[in-house]
Amino acid sequence: MNIDTKILDELTAKAKGCERLRMNYDLRTSLGDTSQRMLNALEPGTVVPIHRHRTTAETVIIVRGRVKEFLYDECGNLLEEILMEVGGDCPVLQIPAGQWHTIESLESGTVIFEAKDGAFAPLSEDDIFKK
């Protein structure tokens, strides 16, 4: 499968038309594929709560646009802001299992690639940070 600008543009258009201002594109190869691999189009203004994945690291690769990843400690204190942009200093980020984090889209048309181990499971209440 070639992931070309047509696919990215269509995904971005869906994100712009979605109330959440984001849309993902599943890259798994079959129903038996238990990995999580996806493209995620993120428009400015989308709200991704501070969360963690207890049992898997998360790999994020910027495909186009710009985002900031924010990493937090257990008390919700900001530890680090990481700018991700194509051709920038950090186009790939590996977020360790259990790390509290969120993401902010800085540019319309932004698309990231995300990968995590195991089948998708919705976040539990304990994995969404409450201020």
Image (cartoon, rainbow, N blue to C red):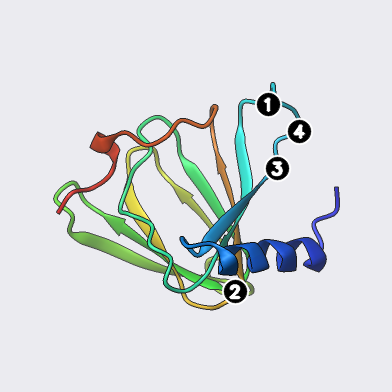
Residue drawn 76% across the image and 33% down it: 29
| Nearer-N-terminus badge (3/2) | 3
| Residue occupying the far right of the picture | 1
Q: Position of residue 89 (x, y in %)?
A: 53, 72
| Residue named by callout 4 | 29
- Return the mark for residue 23: none
Which residue is at 57% across, 77% downward? 108
Q: Helix, strand, or loop for circle 3? A: loop
Of residues 51 and 80, the one nearer the viewer is 51
Secondary element under disc 1, as helix, strand or loop, is loop
Residue at 77% from the left image edge and 61% from the top image edge: 7
- Counting from the top left corner in percent of width and height, residue 56 is at 45, 34
Q: Which residue is mark 3?
A: 27
Residue 15 occupies which quadrant of the picture? bottom right
Label 2 amino acid? Gly
Residue 33: image tag? 1
Circles 3 and 4, Cβ within 8 Å, touching? The answer is: yes
Residue nearer the viewer, 128 or 86: 128
Q: Residue 95 at what x, y percent from top left?
A: 43, 48
Secondary-structure class at tag 4: loop
Distance of mark 1 from mark 4, alpha carbons?
A: 6 Å
Structural distance between the alpha carbons of marks 4 and 2: 26 Å
